[in-house]
Amino acid sequence: MKISLKITVAVALAVITLLAGCRKEDRIDDNTFIIAGNSNSSYNREIVPEDCLIFPEDIIQCTPEMYRHDLLIRFLSGESMYIEINKTASSSAVPVGSFPFSGQCQEGSISYFFLQDSRKSAGLYFSSGSITVSRNGDVYDIDIDMKIDQNSGGGTLKGNFHGPIQPGEAR
């Protein structure tokens, strides 16, 4: 009887340890973004996404030829985040994977944070970071961990969009 109890306790502890170890560390709650450490204190706050759009794939004239996928996360407060994911392979689907911050004609991502739902003037430019896109059925998770460029006041933008991605109108 004592051995059976010890085994049960050991298994229970192993399961709890396994479950605790499998969660993502430093992940912001689903559907929340936080801007922190910016020299413009009005930017430092929590914002909540309203939705996310994907636009039709474009070909970028690079060597080798690149394919650009544009995502637009719109926030309830009126801001938006434009994400450009560049890949060497064409795909009609939302790209899934981890995309480090990159430049034009490189695989990875380029992002801008806009103060209004427009792509005319950016409020924050980024200098490094990564974007990870995962999918479970029709529900996507877009995890963002970006360092804000010093010319935009420095700091970080971290967060997660969790939900369906809708098609946007052609540009």
Image: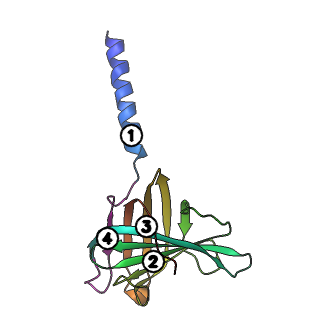
Alpha carbon of mark 3 to alpha carbon of mark 4: how far?
Answer: 10 Å
Q: Is residue 154 above or below residue 71?
A: below
Q: Is residue 35 magenta?
A: yes
- Label 2 crowd (10 A; few <14 / some 14-19 / many >=20): many
Tell me the residue at 64%/75% (across/down): 106
- The residue wearing badge 1 is 19
3 or 4: tag closer to the N-terminus? 4
Circle 4 SS class: strand
Amino acid at the residue labelled 4: Ile
Colouring style = rainbow
Circle 2 is placed at which residue position? 82
- Label the magenta part by its dominant secondary structure: loop
Q: How many marks?
A: 4
Looking at the image, tell me whether mark 1 or mark 3 is earlier in sequence order.
Answer: 1
Q: From the viewer's perspective, is the residue at label 2 or at label 4 nearer?
A: 2
Instruction: Left or right? Give the position of 107 relative to 33.
Output: right
Q: Is residue 84 above or below residue 27?
A: below
Residue 45 position, x and y percent, is 26, 75
Q: Residue at label 3? A: 144
Q: Residue at x 68, y 66 (%)?
A: 89
> What's drawn in magenta, residue-wise?
25-44
With 52 as the anchor, is 46 left or right in this view?
left
Instruction: Tell me the amino acid under the disc marked 1.
Output: Leu
Please, what is the three-letter code of the amino acid marked with disc 2?
Tyr
Q: Amino acid at mark 3?
A: Ile
Whether residue 69 is visible: no
Question: In the picture shown, does residue 29 fall above or below 4?
Answer: below
Label 2, secondary structure: give it.
strand
Q: Element type at marker 1?
A: helix
Quote the CA–CA distance across marks 2 and 4. 16 Å
Number of other residues with Cα within 10 Å of mark 1, as a class: few under 14, some 14 to 19, many 20 or more? few
Residue where numbered disc 4 is placed:
34
